[in-house]
Image: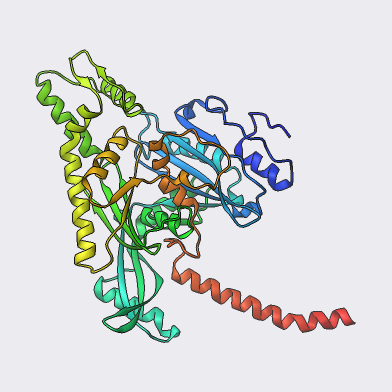
Amino acid sequence: MALTKDINSTERLLNVIRGSHQPSVEKADLAEDQSPKQKNSKKLSINFPQIANKYHIKVGIHISRDDANFVKMAKTSDGRLLLIDQKILKFPDHISKGSQEFNDLLKETLNAFVGLPGDCEIWALMSATDVKVHYLKIPIVPKKELENVIYWTAGKENPIDEKSMIFDYEMQGEITDQGIPKYSVMVYSASRSEVEKIRDMFLSMGINLSGITIAPFAFQNIFRTKWIDVTETTYASLFIGNDFSRIDIFSRNNLVMTRGIKTGISSMVEALNESLAEILPKQEVDNERLQKILTDISADAEKSIKDEDGIHWNDNTILNMIRPALERLTRQIERTLDYYTTSVGYEKVEKVFISSVRNNFYRLILHYVNEQLVIKSEAFDPYEAKNFSSSVSLSLMERASLVPAIGLSLSDRKYTPNAIFTYVDKKKEIIKKRINRGFLQHLRPLYSYVRLS
């Protein structure tokens, strides 16, 4: 069945679920079907096979300072995870984050992307700065004692204020500590007020979130689900944000260390402005013109532009201007990796995956970090996976910026730490299922008797 351009991605998905013919592969028209508020967004639809059940659809939403990224993931009838849609919404300059106009734009875009909220799980991010992650070595104790041992051990090392913090933990298997078998446990505490703020924001849009987590755990989803199959045992993810960066270290697909780094894109912009102030000491920089130059060069490594001030803009010019910030960044990465190996005493990190918010420096950052680090580094490109069926016309920078949202869309309560569904909620759910099973077992003899009668 040929599909017209006015059918959105959710309707296409529902057609497949209902058993309609497979839609043909075609790129979505980025200029059509958009309200004036959505003109700065990018949306691409991906062809997909039969979806097993509409409730297998999961949506990840990553809201950053300048844009919001949306990813829709589904599970096919053969059990494969498949990326079926993504959207990058750039916030207009005149809209301030947190304003009513901002919330209206987000609600309008989200509702159009999600379709019927009750038909899928929706996961969102909270800032990693509002969450403390720690690792414990717990003695092997009976299962009924485990929860209390974890709670009191965690509280002893870092006091838990349940009024202001949400506490949760995850078992990560058995280890040997100085010849003694123990449990390795990841524990975290999240700001209760921040969790409620995010939950309430989405509730005001008519969205009841299935999960709230942090970027390190979203990245962990990518490795745990083998969306990207990593051959190395120990590896790291470097995410470069606007005002900070963060390095996460993984061992055998488990997050084992996360650390914030103060250097971010704003540090590079500051370094560039300082260089311009030295070159043009008595002249105010035209930021709009500068932004256009940076955007043009970021799209073409061979491009060279001579502006009206006589500056020859190219990769080398920009790299030299932002070098002080890049040097700080690489030094902090090296110190973190060295600390993990020598002080913590774990295996050496073998590879670093680099992702970032959308910015004009991404290609230069990749090049510089790869040259400076002793270990191998590469772009964190989630589209290297073959889990979609049509070509995706996104730049490497855009693909890397979608990593957090893709990680969120791979979330599952079984393996993703969730600030709104903690070990307490899991325990209640287990008890409820046991009661239901027991109730059904008691009903079976009566049901058999009624049938025989």
Q: Is residue 93 above or below residue 112?
A: above
The color scheme shown is rainbow
| Residue 390 located left or right of residue 307 | right
User: Within the image, what quadrant is residue 250 found in?
Assistant: bottom left
In x, y percent, where is residue 409? 49, 51
Does residue 206 appear in the picture of this structure? no
Locate the N terminus and report the quarter of the image it occupies. Answer: top right
In x, y percent, where is residue 315? 25, 28
Q: Is residue 202 above or below residue 298?
A: below
Nearer-the-camera pick, 170 or 38: 170
How many marks the image carries: the answer is 0
In x, y percent, where is residue 440? 70, 78
Q: What residue occupies the far right of the structure in this picture?
A: 453
Locate the C terminus and report the quarter of the image it occupies. Answer: bottom right
Nearer-the-camera pick, 91 or 104: 91
Q: Is residue 39 above or below residue 203?
A: above
Residue drawn at the location 16% of the way across and 20% of the way down:
284
Q: Is residue 402 above or below residue 30?
A: below
In x, y percent, where is residue 127? 34, 52
Nearer-the-camera pick, 146 or 205: 146
User: Within the image, what quadrant is residue 399 found in?
Assistant: top left
Residue drawn at the location 65% of the way across and 39% of the way down:
12
Does residue 91 appear in the picture of this structure? yes
| Residue 120 located left or right of residue 102 | right
Q: What residue occupies the far top of the structure in this picture?
A: 308
